[in-house]
Structures are given as structure tokens and as C-alpha cells.
Amino acid sequence: MKLFFAIVIMMQSCLLLHSQAPTLFGVHGSSSPQVLQDLGAQIARYGFTDYQIKNAINNNSTQAIDKAINLNNLGIKQVVHLTWPDTTSVNEYERIPVGIDSIEVFQYLDTLITSIGPYIDYIQISQEPFGATSYNPNEQITNVIDWWKAVALFIRNKQSLNPTELGHIQLITGGITGVNGAIADPNSQIAALIDSVINFGETYCDAIAIHMHVVDTIMGENIINYIKSRTNFPLACTEWSQAKAAMSVGTNWINLINTTFDSTHPYYGLTNKQVMYSAYLNPMDGTEWDSFISTSPFTPNFIPDFYSIMDINCFEFVCFGGAFQFGSPGYDWASLYASKTVSQTYPNNPFFSEFVNVSYLINNGLYTTNCSLLGISDNNYYQQLNIYPNPFYEYATIEFNNNNNEIYTLSIFNILGKKVREISNIKINKIVVNRDNLRVGIYFLRLYSNNQIRGVGKFIIK
């Protein structure tokens, strides 16, 4: 309790120094919309496979749209991640749809975006490219990236055709994992793969996502620092926890025989994982649970401590994935959130209390960020280039703010993501772009200074 009030006092003092809204704080898993609101969640992340989309449409199911509308009505922002599992593969790899398969995938994706697009805020392209949704190791990363590009550009085109309903949606990359391997060997294959995802994100998305199931906050900071050494792009985290603390080599606490219960107890002789699974089905007495969980490697205050680190590092949003994730279909933290609003919070503590405390601080204006940047959710992060006329036939004028007298470079990309023109050494705040050899169509603009994106825009040549 003393720690809680200390945090409150600290956050109130910060309030005088910073005015930017803090990083959005929420969950990985949508559960019940009302439960998420009761938890104080500001954002929820959930996913769709292409088969789920297809079945929902073919069966006239309204479950997805109903959930999106309910979450939106409650003021909870939403991240939807897309995946394309190969159900014919023994290893359940992700596939790259081609031919008729690709046409069908886009048809159903079109319907999904049209229906839930007005209510969601982010679309995550892929889930974990090197983790839960990994591709066949024999698949070239360039092929994977090309598929993601096609999906990103398809969504961008939908937005351009319906900017009122869909223009607000931000695109983010799949959650990058395996960063520890890249830190250990910056010249490794995993480092090259991470760079490929980052490069994709910088050109086609609005933010780069990371997954951080770490041992402790130090490991988390190391991962953040590595990613920030590779890019200045906005960051988000769609899954984070202290899962590795329970499963790491050397401790492997989750699979050890528990040391809490004597021979007369029904949980005697079970592994820690089995005890937690049993407690999930039949919550035990709170005192027993506290005694049991005290043997775990979970760090007290991990949730508020690591949230603060990500907030200071300017994350757009962070979706908490549970303190421990063991892969058990019964012990799923996304589902476990459903019981967090009842008086019996076991076996949810101490994770429940920490999550609710952070939510309380944020939602009551007692938590402010130390970040000096504005986020992508703020319309001023990338200034919107003023382009006129738009559409145009012969030439367009592009205006932007240049209050600091910086030198800019303007890059123009076609609908396939190929850079078709670059204008360098721009020292004023207005330039004219002639059509010249550019074909009829939609083009995306990126304004750079010191290798950082300063402005974005889009024009149409008729």
C-alpha cells in the first residue's frame, strides 16, 4: 500500500512537467467488453485467422462485429491481428496465399475491414513472424515480406476509397520476438530477420510492434534499446509478461514439484504448473494462494515498473499478456481476465492488483509520461502534408511546417510500395511536384529529416 501511494505522489509531481497522454494500457485478449471496462483497460488486442473470417461470413455470424461495436462503445481501443495458418501443414506454419487462395483471402478480408473497420483502431499485419505464427524455415523472408506488403497496400487502398470510415486505422507490424538472439549476435540470421521486419514497418506501417515475455525489467530494457538502435519509428507492444522467469533454464519453476503443501493436501506432489491449473478450475483459499505464489520467480511490481519503462520509451500502447503464460489451454490469461471483476480474485493475484492499480493511475490522470515525443494516436506526430490540388493531372503543390529550418527529403511510393521518386535538399516549406512520368493512381508520401519521418501524405493522379 505504501508503494501504491508513493507511485501516486511521484506521478502527480510528473503531471506538472509533462502534458502528453500516457501510453495506452490494456490486455492481449478481448474477453468480455464489460469486464475489460471494469478492469480499466484502455485497449484490447485480439486476432482473426482467415478461416475464422471466412466461416463467420459464410455462417452469417455477427459475433465479431458485435464485439467490435461493444468495445468501441465502451471507449476501449482495439488492435486486430491477422494470420493465415496452413491447416494442411503438420507443423501449422503460416502460409503465403497465392492464386485463387489469395483472391479469396482478400475478398473475406475486404468484408471484415468494411464491417469492423469503423470501430477498431489498429490492424496488426501478422502475429509473431518468428514465434507463434512462424513461417516454414525454407520460406524466403523476402516472400513473406512481399505478402505483408500486399496486405498492407490492400488495407491502404481500402482506406483511400473510404477515408471517413477507415482512414483512422493505423497499421503495425507483427510482434518481433527473438531479440535476445540478435543482441547476442548482431550479425546473426535472427538479427537480419528483425531488420527486415523493421524496414517493412518503416515503409508500410505506422508503428513497429515487439513481444516481450521477459525474465525481468532489465531484459525488457535491453530489448527496447536494441530495437531503438535499429529504428526511430514509433513502437508498440502487443504482448508482454514475465513468462520467461518461470520457464527459463536454471529455474524452470513451472515444472518443479511444488514445495508449499504437505502430504495431506490434495495438491501435494503436483508440479507448480499443475497447481496453477487446478487453482484456475477451483480457486483455492487466498492465504494458500499467496503462500504458493510467493515461491515463484514473479517480481513484485513488475507490471507497473515495466509499464513505466515502456511509457518513458514512447510506446504507443502496451497490451499485457499475463504474468505467466504456460501454453496450457486451460490456463490462459486472456480468459482468466473474465474472473477478475468478481470478489474472488484468486488465482489472479498479485497480477490482478498490479494491473488494476496501473489502470487506476492512468484513468484518473495521476500517471503522465516522461516521453518527449507525440504518438501516432496524436494527429501531430507526423504532420499531414497539405497537398493541392488533389487529385491532380499535371502538378501538385505540397506544403508543410519547417519551423526549425531543417533540410528535408521527400520520397514518393506507388501502390506496390516501390519508391518512384525522391526529391532531396528541400530547405523551404513548399515544393511543386510535376507528374512527369508518373502514371494514374494513388501515391504515398514520406517527408524525412535526419533519417526520421517528419510528415506523411497521399495524392492521386487522375
Image (spheres, rainbow, N blue to C red):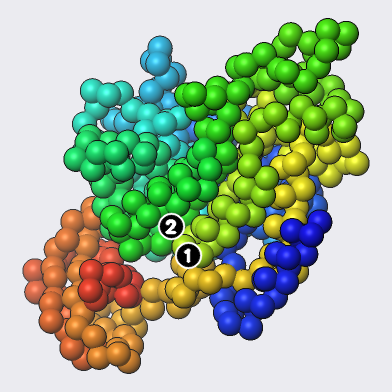
Q: Secondary structure at mark 1?
A: loop
Q: Position of residue 71 (x, y in %)?
A: 69, 52
Tell whether 39 sits left or right of 249.
right
Q: Residues within 10 Å of mark 2 (few under 14, many from 20)?
A: many
- Closest to the observer, 392 or 27: 27
Residue at the location (40% across, 49% down)?
Answer: 222
Tell whether 226 sits left or right of 339.
left
Type of the residue with mark 2: Leu
Q: Position of residue 67 (x, y in %)?
A: 69, 45
Type of the residue with mark 1: Cys
Instruction: Please name the residue that numbered disc 1 is placed on.
Output: 314
- Closest to the observer, 122 or 179: 179
Q: Secondary structure at mark 2?
A: strand
**Does the image show residue 190?**
yes
Whether residues under marks 2 and 1 lie with C-beta atoms below 8 angstroms apart, the answer is yes
Measure the C-alpha gap from mark 2 to mark 1: 7 Å
Is residue 310 placed above or below 267 in the rendered structure?
Answer: below
* The C terminus - image quarter: bottom left
Q: Locate residue 171: give its quadrant.
A: bottom left
Q: Position of residue 184 (x, y in %)?
A: 29, 38
Q: Position of residue 199 (x, y in %)?
A: 26, 52
Give the number of the disc on residue 235: 2
* Mark sitting earlier along the chain (2/1): 2
**Does the image show residue 155?**
no
Residue at the location (30% across, 70% down)?
Answer: 453
Is residue 158 placed above or below 438 in the rendered structure?
Answer: above
Q: Residue furthest left?
A: 437
* The N terminus - image quarter: bottom right
- Closest to the observer, 417 or 256: 256
